[in-house]
């Protein structure tokens, strides 16, 4: 008889499938779900979770792979993976994490699953293995994603990285209590931990079991945006507060019950942590100096927005907290204090904290974000989420029961269906593929399309009717659902390489010619013409034929073909 948690877990999985326009294979649905729960503390978007899932044949018994550098998820176009990247930009002791997820719909944990993963990882994590040899043994996705880790490890070697490797084994069985993990499986798990810790001297290996109870519990846990902040002195004017906060108390505010950084309270900040850049080195040096002056004399402080602030006994209770300015200072404080001796003078220094109560007024929050960040050197590209065009798109989507996640995970954490949530990066990729006929850029540069002002203005413009953005978003969701269906018969690696190219081909078929400007899609958007009218199976057959021909002609791998402009140029010639 199934446990209650297993019944409840299966109910969630059924609900997730019902939300999809076309159900996917049950095994794949479980892999996606398990990967999401395994990394729940990282608050990845649905697209980031899906990008890491590589399950299929020759996957080395690993279904999903994620690599983080100082908490930032790596993608193919991350700076640290590019040729010529200088590691001196990062601080010494930078944290490099590899997360590996194995997900089986079975109701037990087995030795065989761990044995297979251990055997594969002995090669996949070895820096001496030749990548061409690995590709003969494992799928391109497995080699590519573990390659992020191998390359990052080489690049960061001079910075003495703190390396952690996590292996998460998830099933629908019991991970704790009676009739759970048997002794042989537990021993194999300890052996695997030792193997992972041996990848590099000083590395840490972790093996974690997630059963039905743990998966169900995590799926029903929403990150808390209500927290407390103890202060020393404060001043209040209306809904605004200014407070001096001891760094030891600010550290408590920044960390969760497991002493990890609460990354979700920085979701609305305009830029990521910049690492060992000059300003962060100066902040750290001011903390390290035992004879240094008060921290707040040398630092601009931190700006927090929240929906409600209540002060009792020199402690603020803050609802819907977001740190919108001061991410660099916060990360540097966290990184220093977590390893500093508890009697270090820095703990008793203070940081200046501004607390602005904006209620549920998102427009006011945007104004605060822009104003506080314009006082420091922030590239214009970092303020994209607060642009008028981004807010217009969000409002239009909401009017049609779709959700534009210009603030990462805002709608997901509000309980909206992931199938109707579209991130800024996905919309940019879809417009680049369907509106500008450059699916190679969408495939090769998933996270950097928004960095260049020229490209950003081509993708997001007030001159492009807002209904086009919704049509493009829905069309890309149609493509992804079709490629994930059993009817398409497409493997996971093929899906990743085809999705934006197929979107371009199908759109060109509907329009009657290759599309060079998003404005050409206005008639399709106005009448709501679905992309399925382009005969997606026929478009897929054409794309497969062209991929195969190009592979025979050049000898390049499908992955390289999808990322290159030559293939797209030839495809456009045929569509013309």
Image (cartoon, helix red, strand yellow):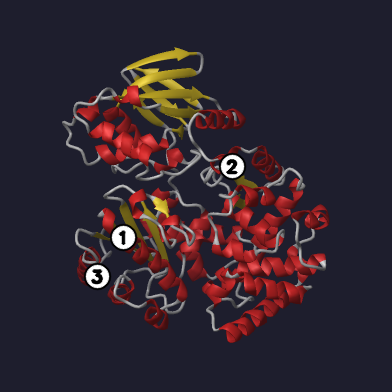
Q: Position of residue 89 (x, y in %)?
A: 36, 49
State the CA–CA distance, disc 1 to disc 3: 17 Å
What is the secondary structure assignment of the residue under circle 1? strand
Residue contact between numbered discs 2 and 3, judged by CB atoms under 8 Å: no
Q: Determine the residue positioned at 28% across, 64% down.
A: 180
Residue contact between numbered discs 1 and 2, judged by CB atoms under 8 Å: no
Q: Position of residue 383 (x, y in %)?
A: 56, 39
What is the secondary structure assignment of the residue under circle 2? helix
Q: Which mark identifies residue 166?
A: 1
The residue sitting at the bottom extreme is: 552
- Pick the front one: 199 or 55: 199
Q: Which mark identifies residue 384?
A: 2
- Image: 555 above or below 335: below
- Image: 535 above or below 326: below
State the CA–CA distance, disc 1 to disc 2: 34 Å
Q: Which mark identifies residue 185?
A: 3
Q: Is residue 212 left or right of residue 512?
A: left
- Pick the front one: 379 or 429: 379
């Amino acid at each position: 008889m199934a446990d209650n948690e297993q019944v409840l877990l299966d109910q969630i999985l059924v609900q997730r499938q019902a939300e999809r326009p076309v159900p996917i294979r049950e095994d794949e649905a479980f892999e996606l779900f398990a990967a999401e729960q395994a990394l729940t503390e990282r608050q990845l978007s649905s697209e980031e979770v899906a990008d890491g899932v590589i399950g299929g044949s020759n996957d080395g018994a690993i279904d999903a792979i994620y690599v983080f550098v100082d908490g930032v998820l790596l993608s193919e176009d991350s700076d640290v993976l590019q040729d010529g990247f200088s590691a001196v930009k990062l601080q010494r002791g930078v944290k490099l994490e590899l997360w590996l997820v194995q997900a089986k719909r079975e109701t037990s944990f087995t030795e065989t699953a761990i044995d297979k993963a251990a055997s594969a990882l002995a090669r996949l994590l070895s820096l001496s293995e030749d990548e061409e040899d690995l590709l003969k043994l494992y799928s391109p996705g497995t080699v590519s994603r573990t390659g992020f880790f191998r390359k990052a490890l080489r690049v960061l070697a001079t910075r003495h990285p703190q390396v952690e490797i996590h292996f998460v084994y998830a099933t629908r069985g019991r991970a704790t209590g009676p009739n759970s993990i048997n002794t042989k499986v537990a021993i194999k798990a300890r052996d695997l931990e030792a193997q992972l810790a041996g990848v590099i001297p000083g590395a840490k290996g972790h093996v974690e079991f997630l059963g039905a109870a743990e998966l169900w519990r995590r799926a029903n846990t929403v990150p808390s945006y209500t927290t407390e902040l103890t202060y020393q002195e404060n001043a209040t004017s209306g809904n605004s507060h200014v407070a001096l906060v001891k760094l030891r108390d600010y550290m408590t505010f920044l960390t969760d019950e497991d002493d990890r950084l609460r990354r979700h309270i920085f979701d609305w900040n305009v830029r990521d942590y910049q690492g060992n850049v000059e300003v962060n080195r100066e902040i750290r040096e001011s903390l390290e100096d035992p004879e240094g002056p008060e921290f707040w004399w040398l630092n601009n402080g931190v700006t927090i927005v929240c929906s409600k602030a209540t002060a009792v006994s020199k402690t603020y209770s803050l609802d819907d907290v977001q740190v919108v300015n001061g991410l660099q200072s916060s990360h540097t404080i966290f990184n220093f204090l977590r390893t500093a001796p508890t009697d270090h003078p820095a703990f008793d220094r203070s940081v200046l904290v501004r607390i602005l109560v904006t209620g549920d007024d998102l427009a006011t929050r945007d104004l605060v974000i822009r104003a506080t960040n314009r006082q420091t050197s922030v590239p214009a590209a970092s303020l994209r989420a607060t642009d008028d065009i981004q807010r217009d798109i969000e409002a239009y989507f909401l009017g049609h029961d779709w959700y534009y996640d210009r603030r990462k995970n805002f709608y997901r954490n509000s309980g909206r269906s992931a199938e109707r949530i579209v991130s800024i990066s996905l919309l940019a990729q879809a417009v680049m593929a369907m509106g500008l006929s450059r699916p190679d850029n969408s495939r090769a540069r998933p996270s950097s399309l928004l960095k260049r002002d020229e490209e950003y203005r081509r993708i997001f413009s007030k001159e492009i009717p807002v209904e086009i953005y919704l049509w493009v978003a829905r069309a890309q969701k149609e493509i992804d659902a079709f490629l994930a269906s059993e009817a398409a018969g497409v493997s996971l690696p093929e899906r990743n390489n085809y999705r934006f190219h197929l979107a371009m081909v199908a759109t060109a078929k509907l329009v009657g010619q290759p599309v060079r400007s998003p404005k050409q899609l206005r008639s399709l958007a106005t009448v709501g013409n679905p992309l399925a009218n382009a005969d997606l199976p026929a478009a897929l057959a054409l794309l497969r034929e062209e991929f195969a021909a190009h592979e025979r002609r050049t000898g390049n791998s499908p992955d390289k073909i999808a990322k290159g402009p030559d293939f797209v140029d030839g495809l456009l010639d045929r569509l013309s």
